[in-house]
Amino acid sequence: MQLRPIGMIHSPFRECKDMPIQPAMAQGVTGSIQVFDEFAAGLKDLAGFERIWLLFWFHRAGSARMSVTPYLDSQERGLFATRAPSRPNPIGLSHVRLLAVEGSILRVADLDMLDGTPLLDIKPYVPRFDCLEVTCCGWFDAVSAKTCVADDRFERNKSKQGRTA
């Protein structure tokens, strides 16, 4: 299997510390996405969507850990029950607001990624498929949002302890 970036995400965040932990906590944070020229033709018809999904590579995440302590909790959890970036395949998924398509540049809002994050794919957000009602949300149901920003606990060579939402 081979993955290769199709572009680069540009945001105001240079460090993990104090960065929003999810797009819902990043409302109004703007940035841009540079789609590489060889993939720019794939942006045709994207301008009609209000939101898009971004799949990206957590390029600064530390090694995978099967147990982590999430930002929103004080109890250790299994990795796959969290959104921790330190994963076997450090792939991130976020929905952002699409403000404009300017050639091969996407202007976006509600960004929760580091500047320089490699972009793997773009998909349109379609509420009919992507917005589902649920009745339970695991351990998230029992916690309240104490913090909405990250620290450097998952950054490569930073901390031995693991956490995220």
Image (cartoon, rainbow, N blue to C red):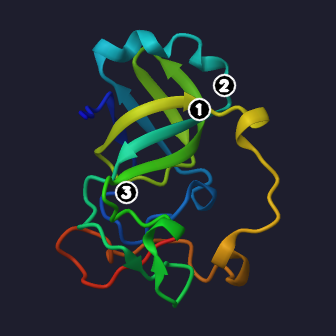
> Label for residue 98?
1
Closest to the observer, 46 or 84: 84
> How packed is label 2: few (under 14 Cα within 10 Å), some, or many (20 or more)?
some
- First of labels 1, 2 by sequence position: 2
Q: What residue type is labelled 2?
A: Phe
Mark 1 secondary-structure assignment: strand
Across and down, in percent, residue 57 comes to 33, 47
Residue that mark 3 sits on: 13
Across and down, in percent, residue 149 comes to 50, 71
Of circles 2 and 3, which is in front?
2
Which residue corresponds to the image point at 57% horizontal and 54% vertical from the top-left?
A: 23
> Label for residue 48?
none
Q: What residue type is labelled 3?
A: Phe
Which residue corresponds to the image point at 28% horizontal and 45% vertical from the top-left?
A: 116
Mark 3 secondary-structure assignment: loop
Residue 126 occupies quadrant: top right
Closest to the observer, 107 or 94: 94
Residue that mark 2 sits on: 49
Mark 1 vs mark 2, CA separation in Å: 7 Å
Residue 121 occupies quadrant: top left
